[in-house]
Image: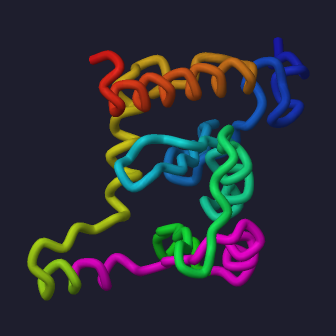
Amino acid sequence: MGVPEHRWRGDESAVRGGSTGRTPTDRGKSGTKRSVQTDGAGVPIGVAIDGANRHDSRLLRATIESVPVKRAEPTSSNSQGMCLDKGYDYPFVREILEAFNYVPHIRSRGEEKLDKEAVPGYRARRWVVERTHSRINRYRRLVIRWEKKVENYLAFLKFVCGIIAFRAAGVFG
């Protein structure tokens, strides 16, 4: 008795669901990667998902396009920056940011540590997104992906991002 053939047709199979991929850090198990765009206070404004085997930089365009609210056009006196870590330091990432009129701020981890030691009161901006991921992980439904359909998982993820945004605004605690 063998394994049913439908189980191993690829990422879109009935068993694994879509937007999953073999994660290199977890012995090749299937997983989902979240990419979250936040404002300066850590409120999620855009989210995208894909397989865990995708590099973070490949989700940048989908994450920026997922922002539901049209943002104000940047001007020369009021530019809009995008803070990213060294994993996004590629020419195609800079082209994407230029296409969306963002000023890229791509720094390595060591640079921020040096600035924190040299400048009193300096706050590293990159931890804002990590804090948002931690807030998302407080909802156990999203820590492990139980949904087979991509649409259902993404709907739960967007719902949680909405709850986080409302709590940040003080609408409900």
Q: Is residue 136 magenta?
A: no
Image quarter where the N terminus lies is top right
The scheme the figure's colours follow is: rainbow
- Residue 114 position within the rendered picture, expressed as x and y whole percent measured from the top left: 21, 86
Image quarter where the C terminus lies is top left
**Of residues 25 and 99, the one drawn nearer to the viewer in this rendering:** 99
Q: Residue furthest top?
A: 1
What count of labels does the image hold? 0
Residue 68 position (above or below residue 151): below
Residue 136 position (above or below residue 172): below
Q: Is residue 93 magenta?
A: yes
Residue at the (58%, 77%) spot, across then down = 103
The image quarter containing residue 13 is top right
Residue range of the region highlighted in magenta in the rendering? 90-113
Residue at the (54%, 79%) spot, across then down = 77
Asked if residue 113 lies left or right of residue 92, the reply is left
Residue at the (89%, 31%) spot, across then down = 9
Residue 41 position (above or below residue 146): below
Residue 57 position (above or below residue 46): below
Q: Residue furthest left?
A: 120
The image quarter containing residue 28 is top right
- Residue 100 position within the rendered picture, expressed as x and y whole percent measured from the top left: 72, 66
**Of residues 53 and 108, the one drawn nearer to the viewer in this rendering:** 108
Asked if residue 34 lies left or right of residue 61, the reply is left
**Of residues 123 and 32, the one drawn nearer to the viewer in this rendering:** 123
- Residue 138 position within the rendered picture, expressed as x and y whole percent measured from the top left: 34, 26
- Residue 75 position within the rendered picture, expressed as x and y whole percent measured from the top left: 62, 74
Asked if residue 82 lies left or right of residue 130, the reply is right
Residue at the (60%, 81%) spot, across then down = 76
